[in-house]
Amino acid sequence: IANPNHVIPESWYLNNRRTIKRKVALYPYLTGWPKKVSTYSQPALGNIDRFGNAEIAYASLDSIYIFNPDGTNFGNWPKYFKGVAGLTLANVNADQNLEIIAYSPESLKVYNYQGNVLSGWPVAMPISNYYFDALPAIGHIENFSTWSIVIVARPNVTQPSTQPMHILIYATNGQLDHNFTLSHAIGGNEETPCVSIGNMVADVNEHDEIAISYCDPRGSGTYKTEIFNNSGLVRILNYGNTETIGLIDLTGDGLVELIIGDGLGYIYYAVIAVG
């Protein structure tokens, strides 16, 4: 939910109903909307240049679009990015403007708000016969003074195999800091996993943890969630989903708890601890 013009009670609406697919719209419909796009993806909202109202970022087929609230193109956008599948907005280089972190199956890129690719990017998939998947997530994986970009790598296969998914953790300059392996093998037909980041575990290192939730092909419709920090796997939970993970500090202790719906119809509340 967002309100670019500060006047609309429900301002964001992504309409993917069966009869009106592939349109981006502000709801109620405003002048300049909807926009016809080529493919469905998850939009991102943010004031990327710190001026005026929020902008709307959207990945569609081979282009990244950024729209003003009135539907016009923002600045020098759109930008061509072959096969782009999704994007995230975050201030990762400490300039107070938002950067656009976008991925395709083969490549991960970081743009500044003007549409220029930052130094050190793009990076190619570092694992042979794997591809990038799931929206990039941003967090303080090393420490609370630096940002990291986290994305999933999954094997380019159509059947379950001995190849596991990986979690790749990049520094903001494009350096690959960590390559962690999930605990089981997965094929290429399972749903895209979801990833969230937050400070879940009290420790002296003061860094965030990564939660990744996915469908486990070894069971019939079972789900799992794995928690990682910058040293590797912390804990495996025998529930999860492939839609979203809620992280919020409900107890006021400075640590986030995990709220997650399970693919089998339950909602779980978890306090994550090492061991």
Image (spheres, helix red, strand yellow):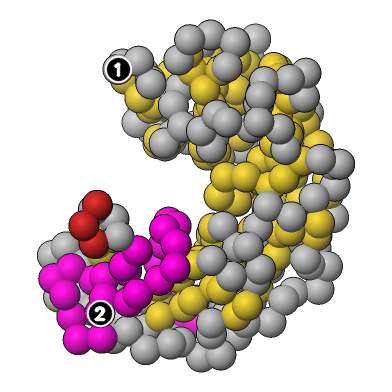
Q: Residues within 10 Å of mark 1 (few under 14, many from 20)?
A: few
Image quarter (top left, top right, bottom left or bottom right) of the N terminus: bottom left
Residue at the (13%, 71%) spot, across then down: 28
Secondary structure mostly seen in magenta is: loop
Residue 146 visible at all: no
Residue at the (30%, 60%) spot, across then down: 21
Q: Position of residue 236 (x, y in %)?
A: 60, 15
Q: Position of residue 264 (x, y in %)?
A: 35, 15
| Residue 117 sits in quarter | bottom right
Disc on res. 265: 1
Please, is residue 93 above or below residue 246 in the view? Answer: below
Task: Tell me how far mark 2 sits from mark 1, CA to CA.
Answer: 36 Å
Please, is residue 130 above or below residue 148 in the view? Answer: above
Residues in magenta?
22-50
| Residue 190 sits in quarter | top right
At label 2, the amino acid type is Trp
Q: Earlier in the sequence, mark 2 or mark 1?
A: 2
Residue 58 visible at all: yes
Image quarter (top left, top right, bottom left or bottom right) of the C terminus: top right
Q: What is the number of callouts on the image? A: 2
| Residue 36 sits in quarter | bottom left
**208, 117: nearer the viewer:** 117
Q: Are marks 2 and 1 in contact (CB under 8 Å)?
A: no
Disc on res. 33: 2
